[in-house]
Every structure is written in C-alpha cells, then in structure tokens.
C-alpha cells in the first residue's frame, strides 16, 4: 500500500448497475428508451419542462431504497483504511457511495436527490416529486425548480478540484464507465500525464482502454473488492 499515496477513483453507472440502477448506454439502458436531447439538456427543459421533471421523478423513485453493493462498500473501506489520500469522483447521481460510507466524494454530474431553484439559485436536498407548481422553500417562486444534475452542454461540478487531484495522484482507478462522456473520459490521460498508474475495472473494455496501464474486466461487485484487497495488502 505504501506504493500509492494519492488515489483518485472515477466511477460510472456500471458500478451501480449491480444495485439495480439502469445504465445509460448498454443495450436496454436509459438512452434506448429516452432521447437525450429531450430529457437531459437545457434546451429540452426549456421546450418541455414537464417531460423533464416527470423523467427525473421517475429516476428519483427508482433510486429510493436501493442499497450499495460490494463494490461501493470496498471503495469506502479503501478510503477508511488507506493511510494516504483517496478522492472518489462519481458520474452517478445516486447516493450509494455515501450510504456505503465514502466521505471524500465529488458528484461531478450532480445528485438526483437535490433540486435547484433557477429564480434564486437556492440548491437543496429534495426527495419528493417536482412539478410546475412546486414552490421554492427559499423564495416562494413556483415553476422555477429543476433537478440539480448536470445536463449535456453544461459544465460538470468541481472540475478545478478534480483536475488538481488528477495531476497530483499516483494511482487512478476508473470503475464502471464507458469512456465516452467527456470530460470524465479524458481523466485517464491527465492522470497518466502526471505519471500515475492507471487501472480500468469494467465489465467490458471501455473506449479508452488503451490508455490504461492495467485492466481488470468483470463484475464490479467481484473485481473491486478483490482489487482493494490487493491494494491494502500492498501488492
């Protein structure tokens, strides 16, 4: 374990699939049922806010009651037992990493259980449905709430902090991500540029698999605990 002192972990929808949350790009995934431009862009929200709110109400309901799987628990264990720095960056909007016990966590694409008032900029925890009559608890404006998630065409959260961590890390782990969505797909290049050892743990090779020093392909719930055990043993 002394070999790696600063670890950055990127997780995507593949890590939560084993907890029952659908992925986006796999066969039968979310984007096979909905058009991205209709439900995950600012333009789609402007055209038909009810459709977008209903879509995220559905997603919020799906996320109620789901539980972390062994991969989430193993990453929380790594943070807890590693004597160096561990930062987990997730593309996922679920709360499975928090429930598992991870503390150093960035939701770069926002969270499904948070809402954002476009009238007063108030952001808050939100577990109920949203509709066009929902009033902001801060300013009282109705019809101004949207999910606090990052849509296509918007800038992910905390990119400066993520970039600094990638440039300082000596181990980069990418888990359960397709390697198609930027800027996250470019994180491995940034980490490698800084000299980090880069590892992909994925069900299948991602589009960026050639950029990694090491690849492990299989179910996250099996392979992530195994890899964490290996790290904590020191080799």
Image (cartoon, rainbow, N blue to C red):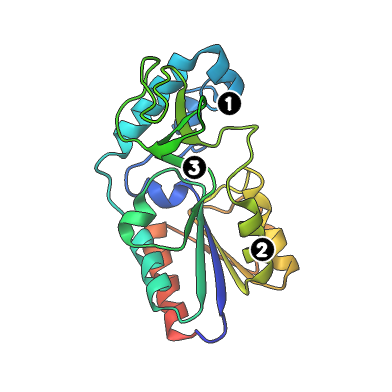
Local SS, label 3: strand
Q: Is residue 59 visible?
A: yes
Quote the CA–CA distance across marks 3 and 1. 14 Å
Q: CA distance from mark 2 to mark 1?
A: 28 Å
Q: Earlier in the sequence, mark 2 or mark 1?
A: 1
Q: Is residue 2 above or below residue 10?
A: below
Instruction: Say if 77 sits above or below 102 in the image.
Output: below
Residue at horizontal 41%, vertical 65%?
Answer: 75
172 or 33, which lies in front?
Answer: 172
Q: Where residue 1 sits in the image (x, y, percent)?
A: 49, 84
In the image, which is nearer the foreground, mark 3 or mark 1?
Answer: 3
Question: Could you say which disc has been placed on residue 110 in the image?
Answer: 3
On the question of residue 69 being in view, the answer is no
The residue under label 1 is: 41
Label 3: few (<14), some or many (≥20) within 10 Å? Answer: many
- Label pair 3/1, CB-CB below 8 angstroms: no
Residue at image mark 2: 164
65 or 116: which is nearer to us? 116
Residue placed most toward the observer, 169 or 202: 169
Rate crowding at label 1 as few (under 14), some (14 to 19) or many (20 or more) other CA atoms within 10 Å: some
Q: Are marks 2 and 3 in contact (CB under 8 Å)?
A: no
**Left or right of residue 177: residue 232:** left
Residue 224 spot, x, y in % from top left: 42, 65
Q: Residues within 10 Å of mark 2 (few under 14, many from 20)?
A: few
| Residue 182, numbered circle | none
Between the C-alphas of marks 2 and 3, the distance is: 19 Å
> Dot 2: what SS?
helix
Residue 194 picture location, percent across and down? 73, 70
């Amino acid at each position: 374990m002394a070999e790696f002192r600063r670890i950055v972990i990127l997780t995507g929808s593949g890590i939560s699939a084993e907890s029952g949350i659908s992925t986006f790009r796999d066969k039968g995934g979310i984007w096979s049922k909905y058009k991205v431009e209709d439900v995950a862009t600012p333009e789609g929200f402007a055209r038909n806010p009810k459709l977008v709110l209903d879509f995220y109400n559905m997603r919020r309901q799906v996320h109620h009651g789901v539980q972390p799987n062994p991969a989430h628990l193993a990453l929380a264990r790594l943070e807890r037992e590693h004597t160096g720095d561990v930062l987990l960056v997730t593309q996922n909007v679920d709360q499975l990493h928090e429930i598992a016990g991870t503390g150093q966590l960035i939701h770069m694409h926002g969270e499904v259980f948070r809402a954002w008032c476009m009238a007063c900029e108030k952001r808050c925890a939100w577990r109920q449905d949203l509709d066009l009559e929902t009033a902001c608890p801060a300013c009282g404006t109705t019809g101004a709430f949207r999910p606090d998630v990052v849509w296509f065409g918007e800038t992910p959260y905390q990119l400066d902090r993520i970039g600094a961590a990638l440039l300082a890390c000596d181990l980069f782990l990418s888990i359960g991500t397709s390697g198609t969505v930027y800027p996250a797909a470019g994180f491995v290049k940034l980490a490698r540029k800084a000299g980090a050892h880069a590892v992909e743990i994925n069900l299948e090779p991602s589009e960026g698999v050639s950029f990694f020093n090491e690849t492990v392909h299989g179910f996250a719930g099996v392979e992530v605990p195994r890899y964490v055990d290996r790290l904590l043993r020191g080799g």
